[in-house]
């Protein structure tokens, strides 16, 4: 059956207003005054479209390197806060994002938290992340996981700054009142497996004979850019090109085919040189980081030019279309696994 306009707020009379005041004294309120806001007819994100220029943020982040140590800061991160959500520390209602700096010679304290984190590596020659007893050396474009409640620490034995984009499910964990966090009792967690162990065991389309999935997150914790980029290239050669997304793939848990973590999904897409994408929207707001190239995206009514390493955000249900100058690659992440698990996710393509 055809649908029609949802609730329309009734007129307020003096008599009704007087009644509402008496309700307020009893900590009660009339639903019909607020129903349209409580249950909007379509998503009404508090986030607005926004872009952070990497070169500006990098300069500010390097300044933080002179002001505070990772030991004092725990993590030396500049939060990317949505301009429409001041004071929230959030980039969207359900996702947190930040840029983290580990300077040459530095390490960070070892800790764990219930909130899950992803990293998209921007600058890194020799930096590493250790997760649950295994280190991985990171390279630009690598997509790295820190699953819920795993001990992790970062270090930079190289001579150049290490910078990456952090994405965490902080607002989801806090919405549900489920946050715990603690420091490791020593300075570093022991390294118990050789570097590359997870990649060898889980990244080759094969699994160890006795493998059973012991946690919800993927056993792969570094999806290297070299491999992901090659996958995009091969798929581009085979086609077809999606009219909205170009060639877009999602990172997968090789043991289940599902998302890499229960709360955060991530994607990598190739926009061929001169690509002019059609407008698309979905209910999961997405944070993008430009892995390669330059171009422009129309997000709602606003146009954003982007260059390598810039970060931008597309709010929930907001139409977005991408254009590439030369060939470009975009990384993005969102809360899509949560929305899909709860039966909430919707998309429209093209808008
Ligand atoms: O690297 O563990 O951006 O705990 C925020 C909180 C990064 C981290 C953030 C964190 C981390």
Image (tube, grey):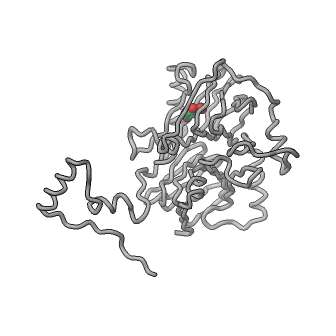
Q: Quadrant of residue 38?
A: bottom left
Residue 48, percent from left and from top? 43, 51
- Residue ID at (54%, 55%): 296
Residue 4 is left or right of residue 227, and the answer is: left
Q: In the displayed structure, would residue 145 be above or below residue 28?
A: above
Residue nearer the viewer, 125 or 338: 338
Which residue is the extreme one toward the left? Answer: 14
Residue nearer the viewer, 250 or 185: 185
Q: Is residue 60 visible?
A: yes
- Residue ID at (62%, 41%): 118
Residue 273 is left or right of residue 299, and the answer is: right
Residue 154 is left or right of residue 169, and the answer is: right
Q: In the displayed structure, would residue 216 be above or below residue 281?
A: above
Q: In the displayed structure, would residue 143 be above or below residue 3?
A: above
The mark total stands at: 0
Residue 150, percent from left and from top? 66, 33
Quick check: which quadrant has ligand 1?
A: top right
Residue nearer the viewer, 255 or 280: 255
């Amino acid at each position: 059956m055809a649908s029609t306009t949802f609730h329309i707020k009734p007129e307020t009379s003096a008599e009704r207003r007087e009644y509402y005041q008496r309700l307020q004294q009893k900590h009660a309120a009339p639903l019909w005054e607020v129903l349209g806001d409580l249950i909007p007819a379509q998503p009404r994100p508090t986030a607005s479209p926004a872009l952070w220029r990497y070169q500006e943020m990098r300069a500010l982040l390097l300044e933080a390197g002179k002001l505070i140590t990772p030991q004092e800061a725990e993590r030396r991160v500049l939060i990317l806060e949505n301009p429409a959500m001041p004071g929230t520390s959030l980039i969207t209602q359900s996702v947190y994002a930040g840029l983290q700096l580990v300077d040459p010679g530095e390490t960070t304290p070892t800790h764990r938290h219930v909130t899950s984190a992803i990293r998209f590596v921007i600058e890194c020659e020799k930096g590493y992340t250790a997760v649950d007893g295994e280190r991985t050396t990171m390279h630009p474009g690598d997509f790295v996981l820190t699953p819920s409640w795993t001990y992790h620490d970062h270090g930079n034995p190289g001579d150049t700054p290490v910078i990456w984009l952090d994405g965490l499910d902080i607002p989801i964990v806090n919405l549900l009142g489920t946050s715990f966090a603690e420091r490791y009792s020593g300075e570093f967690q022991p390294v118990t497996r050789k570097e590359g162990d997870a990649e060898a065991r889980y990244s080759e389309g094969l699994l160890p004979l006795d493998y059973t999935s012991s946690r919800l997150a993927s056993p792969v914790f570094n999806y290297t850019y070299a491999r992901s980029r090659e996958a995009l290239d091969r798929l581009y050669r085979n086609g077809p090109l999606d009219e909205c997304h170009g060639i877009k793939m999602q990172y997968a848990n090789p043991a289940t085919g599902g998302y890499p973590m229960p709360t955060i999904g991530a994607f990598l897409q190739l926009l061929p040189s001169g690509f002019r994408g059609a407008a698309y929207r979905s209910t999961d707001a997405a944070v993008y980081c430009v892995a390669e190239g330059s171009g422009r995206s129309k997000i709602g009514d606003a146009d954003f030019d982007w260059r390598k390493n810039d970060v931008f955000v597309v709010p929930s249900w907001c139409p977005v279309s991408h254009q590439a100058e030369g060939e470009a690659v975009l990384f993005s992440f969102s809360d899509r696994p949560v929305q899909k698990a709860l039966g909430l996710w919707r998309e429209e393509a093209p808008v």
